[in-house]
Image (cartoon, grey):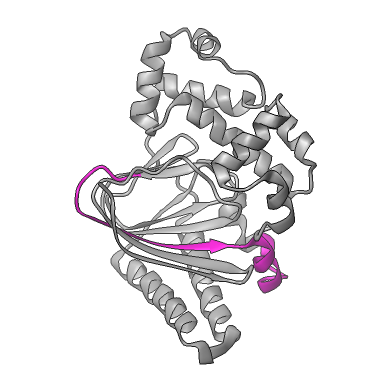
Amino acid sequence: MTNDKKVILERFGTGFSYIQKVTEGKYDPVLHFHECFEIYCFVCGSGSFVVEGKIYDISRPSILLLNDTEIHKPIILENGKYERLIVLVNPTYLKCAFPLHFEQVTSMFNHRRNGRGNQILLKKNELSRYMELFDGLVKAEAAFDTGRLERDVRYLDLVSFVYELYSKNGVKDSGMELNSYVKQAIKFINLNFNMSISLDDLAGELFVNKNYLCTLFKKQLGCTIGAYVASKRMAHASLLLRKGESVRNAALEAGFNDYTNFIRSFKRYYGYTPSKLKKTSMFKR
């Protein structure tokens, strides 16, 4: 059973937030995404990290860069401590912070195919520097008399450092390749998630036994085919809503033909309604 020994979650207005978490034991959350950019730093632990069907090994310290449409999940199977330091980044905030270099800075999130070039492997001194910057961020938030400026400066220092690492390392597609059937299934789903996809149709498209395909998919990605399709649809609907699309059109374009079912599924998935996301989205572009 998962045992969260230490959890710190603070949100700085609509600009950015940080999460520091240490877990002991098996950790296998649901496939998900965030309506913001994410810098996910693995300090210690072993397992894998799934991003859009790509599997990255996390047996050594590394950073995963995730944009606001990439569905992902860590899979920690071994016992022992698993520590991560996460910074969630508001694109609008970055645009204000880096007005002349916004496209350049956000290239580490946006200028690549989803599920490709996400991982930066860290050397010992690089991990130490990230932890130092993250610790400064935590301390600045705890010291109420330092004011917003110092917190923002420390945050921007951390983002700048990660961009420096990204620029130095370049885009390296270091993730593990999937079984060919699973890879083909993901490609088909990614292209057709807004259409009706039955397991029989998918297996027929790939000329493979559906039970065998389900077993392979679950083993490699840690989720069912249905869960993957649902996550893709929800991610697309969320993106459309944040861009100003109506709830009804977002539902249809994401593959939900039943409007009532979309509202119910969305609320069950997120805990709030699509209308509330449109009105209160913290990370609205």
Frontmost residue, 153 versus 141: 141
Q: Position of residue 200 (x, y in %)?
A: 51, 9
Query: Does residue 129 appear left or right of residue 81 in this picture?
Result: right
Query: Does residue 91 appear left or right of residue 18 in this picture?
Result: right
Q: Position of residue 124 (x, y in %)?
A: 29, 66
Frontmost residue, 120 versus 16: 16
Q: Could you tell me which residue is drawn at 20 percent across and 53 percent down?
A: 80
Single out the residue that lies furthest toward the left.
79
Q: Residue 91 lies in magenta, yes or no?
A: yes
Residue 111 lies, with reference to residue 193, above or below; the image says below
Query: Does residue 164 appear left or right of residue 76 in this picture?
Result: right
Residue 208 lies, with reference to residue 159, above or below; the image says above
Q: Could you tell me which residue is drawn at 33 percent across and 28 percent down?
A: 219
Specify the segment rendered in magenta. 75-103
Q: Residue 262 lies in magenta, yes or no?
A: no
Q: Position of residue 205 (x, y in %)?
A: 54, 10
Residue 198's image quarter?
A: top right
On-image quarter of the C terminus: bottom right
Q: Position of residue 70 (x, y in %)?
A: 55, 44
Single out the residue that lies furthest toward the bottom.
145
Frontmost residue, 229 versus 152: 229
Q: Could you tell me which residue is drawn at 53 percent across and 14 percent down?
A: 202
Q: Could you tell me which residue is drawn at 50 percent across and 43 percent down?
A: 32
- Tell me if I can see residue 285 in this picture: no
Frontmost residue, 187 versus 34: 34
Query: Does residue 184 appear left or right of residue 273 in this picture?
Result: left
- Tell me if I can see residue 42 in this picture: yes
Give the number of marks.
0
